[in-house]
Image: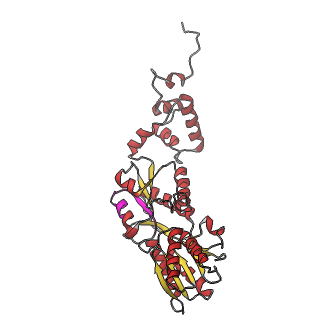
Amino acid sequence: MASDKAKPPPSAGRAERGGQRPTMADVARELGVAKITVSRALSDNTTVKDSTRQRIREAAERMGYRLNVSARNLRQQRTRTIAVVIEMAPSHDRLMSEPYPLSLLGGIMQELTAAGQNMVLTTIDLFSEHPPSTDGVILLGQGVHDDAAAAIEAMGLPYVVWGAAHGPPDRVVVGSDNRAGGRLAAGYLLGLGRRELLFLGETQHGEVDDRLIGFEAGLKGGDAAIVDRIACAFTAAAGREAVAHLLDRGRSFDGIFAASDAIAMGAIEALAAQGLAVPGDVSVVGFDDSPSASIFSPKLTSVRQDWAYGGALLAQKVLDLVAGQKVESRVMPVDLVVRES
């Protein structure tokens, strides 16, 4: 005689079989769908209809199923992790909290998060000594003579670089049009009637070298000249020291193009310390259009590059490389933001 006791719902017997968690196969049997459909739905694959994905997610949650991420990654030979490696060495003069690299990191993080990817943030020295398990690498800054990019390339992982296209032709690089930025700075200073010009920046970095090349090109055919080129780090202290030294030597100049806003601000401080007015005596153009450019006194004229968009492009391209897709470098446009300096 059949028992009058109520039978448990179909999923109850499968939720914990002998204390074991339910499997993907259990979820598939519960809903009468293929196991691959469950796998795709739980991985948010768009080949599964939205309604089916929702039904599978609800059933998985009701049954207590949890995706074994480690096992999935092992099967796919993926860590779902991208390493972001910063070439710059942090110091009291150049902090990690400055717009570079934070603005780039914001764009990278937003894009990787949307793609369901983890991000490991490290420096080039730490990455070289103790490389984490990762599917690909985003390198922020190529280093002097491209050494940081060469070190990453030696790892054999898919990688993209923020910088300038100075390396192998097949290297994927995202960066601003630095030469165009240099030409914009030259044209602006010429338009102000400036004729004795100073360039501040370390040209051993590919991006800075391109800025100088563009600056020189923008001056050709006119009566202005670069009276000095001073190598200095991307810091206000370096710009301040370089200009103070030139002024102490009696060097005359009426315009400055600095390879970064920080350098430009240091240069202006040195000019002010010697009683020279900006822009009355000397006009100054920076590069980056960092947030502090608009609140510095005088407000800094600067070549703007879109770091946040650049970060998003870096993330998109490294993920495409990891997926085996063909990827090309990208040069982003720049523009001149004219202010008071």
Residue at the spot 52% in from the left edge and 92% down from the top edge: 221
Q: Position of residue 192 (x, y in %)?
A: 63, 86
87 in magenta? no
Left or right of 208 on screen, residue 277: right
- The image shows residue 102, relative to residue 46, as above or below, that is below
Q: Position of residue 91 (x, y in %)?
A: 48, 60
Q: Would residue 323 be seen by someone viewing this image from the given angle?
A: no
Residue 276 figure quarter: bottom right
Left or right of 155 on screen, residue 115: right
User: Which quadrant, please, contains the C terminus?
Assistant: bottom right
Q: Would residue 16 be seen by someone viewing this image from the given angle?
A: yes
User: Which quadrant, please, contains the N terminus?
Assistant: top right
Left or right of 131 on screen, residue 90: right
Q: Residue furthest top?
A: 1
Magenta residue span: 150-163
Q: Position of residue 238 (x, y in %)?
A: 50, 70
157 in magenta? yes
For this rendering, which residue is in front, 232 or 180?
232
For this rendering, which residue is in front, 41 or 340?
340
Residue at the spot 36% in from the left edge and 50% down from the top edge: 130
Q: Which colour style is shown?
A: secondary structure
For this rendering, which residue is in front, 97 or 177?
97
- The image shows residue 154, relative to residue 76, as above or below, that is below
How many tags in the picture?
0
Q: Position of residue 272 (x, y in %)?
A: 61, 76
Residue 266 figure quarter: bottom right
- The image shows residue 279, relative to residue 162, as above or below, that is below
